[in-house]
Image (cartoon, rainbow, N blue to C red):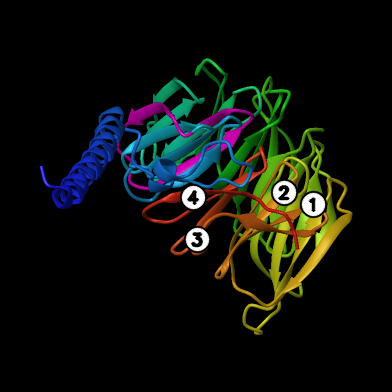
Amino acid sequence: MADDEKPVIKKFKLHRLIGYVCLFVFLAMLVYIATSLLSGRGIGLVDLFSPRGAADSLREYQFDVGRGRVFADLGDGVASVGTLGIQVFNSAGGETLREPFRMTTPAVYSQDGRAIAFDIGGTAVRVFNRSEIITAIETQGAIIAASINKNGWFCVCTQEGGGYKGLVTVYNNRGDSVYRAFLESGYVLTAALSPDNRYLAVLNLPNEGSRITFYRLNSLTPDSVFDLPGGLMIDMRFSSNSELIVVSTQALLEVDRNGDGRGLYEFSGRTLGGYSIGSGFTALHLLDYGVGHRGSIVTLDGAGAILGEHATDREIISISAGGEYLAALRSDGLVFFNSVLEEFPAAGRPGATAGATQVLTLENGAAIAAGDNSAVIFRVGTSG
């Protein structure tokens, strides 16, 4: 063979080798994609090309639970609930639970590793943890709201006929019905169970203002009542010391089991743009009247003392407090704050929050920003 022909042969072998390598990579990707689809895990391109375990890594989850997705923190997992059912991923990105069932308006509430998924206006209820469905219930009346406490006891608020404005049913952690509260006046808005499983608090709307009624689970009659004639109470959650933290349209309140309430922080001169009652602190997004997006984020401890205040004129889409951090989803991206509102950037791919409409801060110091098509995990970056 002539010497001048050898470079041509070598070039041909090199091209063929490169072709084999490309074919191998392509086949490997096909196997990965096929495995993901068969397992129901969904495909995240960031999972394919990002190193695992990096402190500032970002993962993208393709939840396929239908429309109207909402999310919940399960401590060591993230749950998504949509019109087609429930899907749970662990912190490594592996699917640990999938429960198909139809809902029209999905909702979810979680606490201490358990969650309750329910269909607002429907009858479907599922209680679950990271790996299993604990209880499946079909209610008689249309569901208005539901919540779960740290022990796995839960309550479901439903519409009720027969002259009643609503019914709140309490279930233990085995799914057995243990108590029912009938509301004769004022439509029920939400309910919560105390951490010791002894008290039920029901928020309802009488003809004027709003009202919280406390029921002792060993008594058939109401135990105490707290009325708020002006303003509207819109949400509540028991704190770890069993006091009820209440968000109204004009103030953050604390109400005890005797029906005595006190104001923790008043903001009647501003509009409530958003709020989040976390396990360690509460965050309020307050807007100045008639001045675009100008306003502030305020964080408060359990006694109502101000931990921090952050003025902003940027559009804030969603806030969420979890663990030691507060995540704020703005129109220009996501940022983290600690409880005293020192700001930290969010580590992740630029533009990854495009189309996101909600944020959920996880107890492990990350946050999930979700939109119609994907959900992206961010971690706290370094400032400066």
Q: Which residue is mark 1?
A: 339
- Which SS does the magenta portion mostly show? strand
Q: CA distance from mark 4 to mark 3?
A: 8 Å
Q: What amino acid does circle 2 point to?
A: Tyr
> Do the numbered discs 1 and 2 sit on residues whose CB atoms are within 8 Å?
yes
Callout 4: SS: strand
Q: Quadrant of the N terminus?
A: top left
Q: Earlier in the sequence, mark 1 or mark 3?
A: 1
Q: Quadrant of the C terminus?
A: bottom right
Inspect this view and state whether residue 158 appears: yes
Image depth: mark 4 or mark 1 in front:
4
Image depth: mark 3 or mark 2 in front:
3
Residue 114: in magenta span: yes
Q: How many numbered discs? A: 4
Q: What amino acid does circle 3 point to?
A: Thr
Q: CA distance from mark 3 to mark 2?
A: 18 Å
Closest to the observer, 36 or 286: 36
Q: Which of the 4 image quadrants contains residue 344?
A: bottom right
Please tell me which residue is depicted at 35% across the width and 28% down the height of the picture: 99
- Residue 119, image x, y percentages: 40, 41
Q: Earlier in the sequence, mark 4 or mark 1?
A: 1
Q: From which residue to which does the magenta span run? A: 93-115
Tell me if mark 2 has few (under 14), some (14-19) or many (20+) residues whose alpha carbon lies within 10 angstroms of its own.
many
Q: Earlier in the sequence, mark 1 or mark 2?
A: 2
Q: CA distance from mark 1 to mark 2?
A: 6 Å
> Do the numbered discs 4 and 3 sit on residues whose CB atoms are within 8 Å?
yes
Left or right: residue 40 versus residue 344 is: left
> Do the numbered discs 4 and 2 sit on residues whose CB atoms are within 8 Å?
no
Closest to the observer, 161 or 99: 99
- Residue 133, image x, y percentages: 43, 22
Q: Which residue is mark 4?
A: 376
Q: Which residue is mark 3?
A: 353
